[in-house]
Amino acid sequence: MKLEEINIKLPAKPEYMSVARLTTAAIANRMGFTIDDIEDLKVAVSEACSFLIRQFSDITNLTIDYQIDTNADIHVTIASSDADVVNREESRESELSLFIMESVADKVTKVVDNGVIRGFSILKTGGNSLEHE
């Protein structure tokens, strides 16, 4: 069951990734995640954002939606709905980003439209239950 939802929209520029990382850390910290789990989630979100910025040459914005359920699991969806021009060249950085995301998150799902990755859904468990609050 979804308990809380936080949504942000950022310019799709590398200099704004610190905002995504800080927001992710603040939410995970609030949910009682360990320092290691906070770092893992920050890395996963950052890599997803970087992947999408590299994926599209005309991307202007990224949306990041955080959903926290009653078990204090965090579901993060990162999307680029406004981009159409795909950089067809597969880069080592993109492959590495996918590997890193899958290594540090509990579950990563690619959001694919017509064979193009348009976003990611990331699940990280490890927070404390909120039922006692």
Image: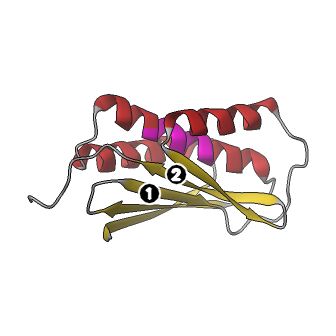
Residue at the (50%, 41%) spot, across then down: 105
Give the side of residue 122 with respect to residue 130, left or right: right
- Label 1: how many Cα within 10 Å (few below 14, some 14–19, many 20+): some
Which residue is pictured at 65% across the width and 58% down the height?
A: 119
Assess whether mark 1 and mark 2 are in contact (beta carbons under 8 angstroms): yes
- Spot occupied by residue 4 in the image (x, y as percentages of width and height): 30, 67
Which residue occupies the foreground of this view, 16 or 67? 67
Mark 2 is surrounded, within 10 Å at the Cα level, by few (under 14), some (14 to 19) or many (20 or more) other residues, namely many
The answer to whether one can see residue 59 in this image is: no
Which residue range is magenta in the image?
Answer: 41-48
Majority SS type along the magenta span: helix
Name the residue beneath numbered marker 1. 75
Magenta stretch contains residue 112: no
From mark 2 to mark 1, how far is it between C-alphas?
6 Å
What secondary structure is marked by label 2? strand
Q: Residue at x 47, y 51 (%)?
A: 123
Q: Is residue 71 left or right of residue 54?
A: left
Label drawn at residue 66: none
Residue at 56%, 33% (x, y): give it: 103
Q: Position of residue 20 (x, y in %)?
A: 47, 48
In this view, 97 is above or below 107? above
Image quarter hosting the N terminus: bottom left
Q: Secondary structure at mark 1?
A: strand
Say left or right for 10 vs 115.
Answer: left
Relative vertical location of residue 112 with respect to residue 16 in this rendering, above or below? below
Q: Is residue 124 visible?
A: yes
Q: Position of residue 129 (x, y in %)?
A: 20, 53
Q: Which residue is mark 2?
A: 122
Under mark 2, the amino acid is Ile
